[in-house]
Amino acid sequence: MTTSAETVIAPPRAQAAAAGAATVGRKQGFQHGGWFVAPFLALFALFVIWPLLRGIYLSFTDANISGDSAGFIGLDNYREALHDPLMWDSLGHSAFFTLLVVPCITVLAFLLAMLAHHIERGTWLWRLCFFLPFLLPSTVAGNLWQWLFNPGTGMVNHVFGIDTPWLTDKSYAMLAVVITTLWWTVGFSFLLYLAALQGIPGHLYEAAKLDGANAWHRMVHITLPMLRHITGLVIALQILASLQVFDQAVVMQDFGPGPEESTRTFVQFTLEQGFTSYRVGYASAISIIFFVIIAAVALARMWLLRNREEGAR
């Protein structure tokens, strides 16, 4: 077999031509795709990036809602916030709410998804009933459960034969908000679990049955491990959403902080500082602190998930 100069030189030329064509294709694809992404980027910059940068700037000033010129005061707002007991109390209320809601809603969503997945008759009706409350606006859900928890005319006390001051006693006020939130938002996590259950291959359960595994063993050794990633997603989403609780709490308490300020959340405290006390600079500093907390929680979740995946390998 003879080797000529053409056979030696042609492949590199062909590779270079192919690489050049690919580069041109990528540039053209980016140019064309950029026009589709540009509206989103413009709106994202306008409604996310710019307010964030503006909030960071205002947090270093003594700006108020009247629009007067804001003077630069450095870190004074942050120092005041870190020594403000009301801020820490409101953060504690949000954290307490999160600790109650996240595990309850995760377990409840999983159980409802298992029920809807294995039920044979009226499947669509069960799925609709479990998911339908999630479609309600927060004000509707809050007003509905405010009426249900009413000590005099509410159905909760009447059905269970009790006389509990759900909304007027600090021992029960936050619990009432938790129950409302579970009923209202469990449908979203239920839908995620249901979709994940439908994606588990059926032959795994058939093989387990042939090996003599009962229903409990199949759930522990097949269902739960296959749902590990979706469970992590549900927990992460619920933590981030629960820390930002606001709507149902203020609606159920007629836009007040609750009995002995027991349902004042961090978001509500920030709103009060900005639009009730007219301290926009201080409210901005609190918002930035809350943003850092939320970002830290999200990054910690990503770090734990990555370490868990690396450990599994």
Image (cartoon, grey):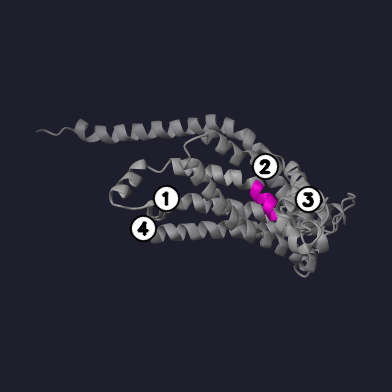
Residue placed at 60% from the left, 39% from the top?
129
Secondary structure of the residue carrying tag 3 is helix
Q: Give the main secondary structure of the magenta stretch.
A: helix
Of pointers 2 and 3, the one earlier in the residue sequence: 2
Q: Do the residues labelled 4 and 2 touch (CB within 8 Å)?
A: no
Residue type marked 4: Arg
Residue 313's tag is 4
Which mark is first along the chain, 2 or 4? 2
Q: Of discs 2 and 3, which sits in the foreground?
A: 3
Q: Helix, strand, or loop for circle 4?
A: loop
Give yes or no for residue 182 being in the magenta stretch: yes
Residue under label 2: 45
> Secondary structure under badge 2?
helix
Instruction: Determine which of the numbered discs, if any, sits on residue 252 in the image.
Output: 3
Query: What's the mark number on residue 223?
Result: 1
Q: Can residue 80 be seen in this view?
A: no
Observer able to see residue 106: yes
Find the magenta span and give its range. 178-183
> Who is closer to the viewer here, 69 or 285?
285
